[in-house]
Amino acid sequence: MNQEPLEKEKILEELAKFKEKDLKYSQGNILGSMCTRADPLAKEVFCDFIDSNLGDPGLFKGTQTLEEKAIKNIGSFLSLEEPYGNIVTGGTEANLMAMRAARNLARKEKNIGNIDADEYIVPEIIVSKSGHFSFKKAADILNLKLVEVDLDENYRVDINSVKENINNNTIAIVGIAGTTELGMIDPIEELSQLAIENDIYFHVDAAFGGFSIPFLKDFGYEMPNFDFSLECVCSITVDPHKMGLAPIPSGCIIFREKKYLDSMAVEAPYLTTKEQSTIVGTRLGAPAVATWAIMEHMGREGYAKNANECMINTDFLADALFKEGFELVTEPELNIVAFTHPNIPTDELARMLEEKGWMVSVSHYPKAIRIVLMTHIKYTHLIDFLASLREIKSELNIK
Ligand code: 0PR
């Protein structure tokens, strides 16, 4: 560390050099990210509330109210009048909170996972093979057994596989509304039925799809039910910092009832509130405020327009790839396209694309090039991307 204080100008100069090394969403070559450019309004608001601490909300009552308003807004498009929850750092923390609530309730109500019991029973959670790796972290942290179930031919969870894996120790079933790799929506209604029949906590991970499925419906897209309108959904993860266009870090966990938050509450005697249910203690208020502000700014109409534009680009890309001889893994359900080429190994294709400046990601199940069509990807970027694919084919002498 430097001994003498450094002037602001020098520091900013130094930072600019580092920033140059970062990619920018506006370049249009970040093709595998679920995050996107933050709206200028959200950035401004974020900076304005940069030192508000929701860990001690009695000191920041305005910020606390804005978090409540953000939760209420999100609840309103997930069919829940009176939502309980928090703006957190992202989908990982939201999923962790949901699994923690499920575990704590199972401890209390079913004596599963109770360390004081005569015989310790390991709680089990059922997540499909396409579940985000945050469930592996949650299982590790909370000492749960992660039971990974199969997918059907369309890469949605296989209901029979879920049925076969439910047992007396199952404390949660997870459904996904917008899988990380392919953007598929699990049959949430059927899963919720299973959860009701077996009296098991049911969580929906809509980190990706939560901010688009309800609005695409407004535009007339046929989308399955995935939210609190289904009686057995206990909690939903939905990330403002993905399709919600809020700045990082902004995730959201919504619970149907207060009892889920209460199940995680620990005493915080010297703070302005006497209990805390979140994982994080000192907690940024800025993302909650920025999330509220961007939602007001977009309105339902703005999100519908945004989601629709992403879908138009998705359909265009899927069609164009097919015409160029690429194979789609599946018909896109949300704004993700995954594809392969029969004669080009996928890793090789990803490497050649990267050499041409395209940052794609490679899905692992099944192995494919995966493009997430976020707002920063425009039609013209797609035209250039398709031109690069044609170049690659001709370099490899493939028609
Ligand atoms: N649930 C689902 C369905 C997700 O897709 C993700 C993240 C999470 C939970 C976890 O969310 P956080 O990462 O906010 O904790 N999905 C993306 C992924 O892993 C995150 C991402 C975003 C990755 C931008 C890369 C990137 O450039 O692919």
Image (tube, rainbow, N blue to C red):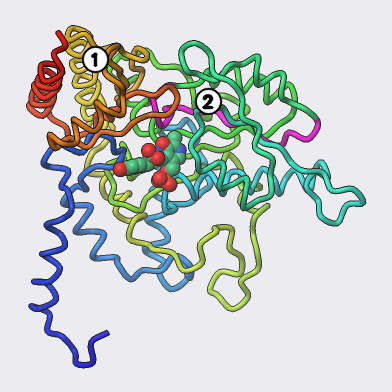
Outermost residue toward the bottom in this view? 4
Identify which residue, 311 or 34, lies in the foreground.
Answer: 34
Residue 34 horizontal/vertical position (percent): 31, 38
Q: CA distance from mark 1 to mark 2?
A: 32 Å
Q: Which residue is mark 1?
A: 318
Residue 390 horizontal/vertical position (percent): 11, 17
Q: Earlier in the sequence, mark 1 or mark 2?
A: 2
Residue 275: image quadrant is bottom right
Q: Answer left or right for 140 relative to 307.
A: right
Residue 68 horizontal/vertical position (percent): 44, 52
Identify which residue, 357 or 315, lies in the foreground.
Answer: 357
Vertical order, 53 against 44 (above or below) = below
Identify which residue, 98 or 378, lies in the foreground.
Answer: 378
Residue 188 horizontal/vertical position (percent): 54, 21
Q: Nearer the viewer, mark 1 or mark 2?
A: 1
Residue range of the region highlighted in magenta in the rendering: 168-184
Total labels: the figure holds 2
Ligand 1 occupies quarter: top left
Q: Residues within 10 Å of mark 1 (few under 14, many from 20)?
A: many
Outermost residue toward the right in this view? 118
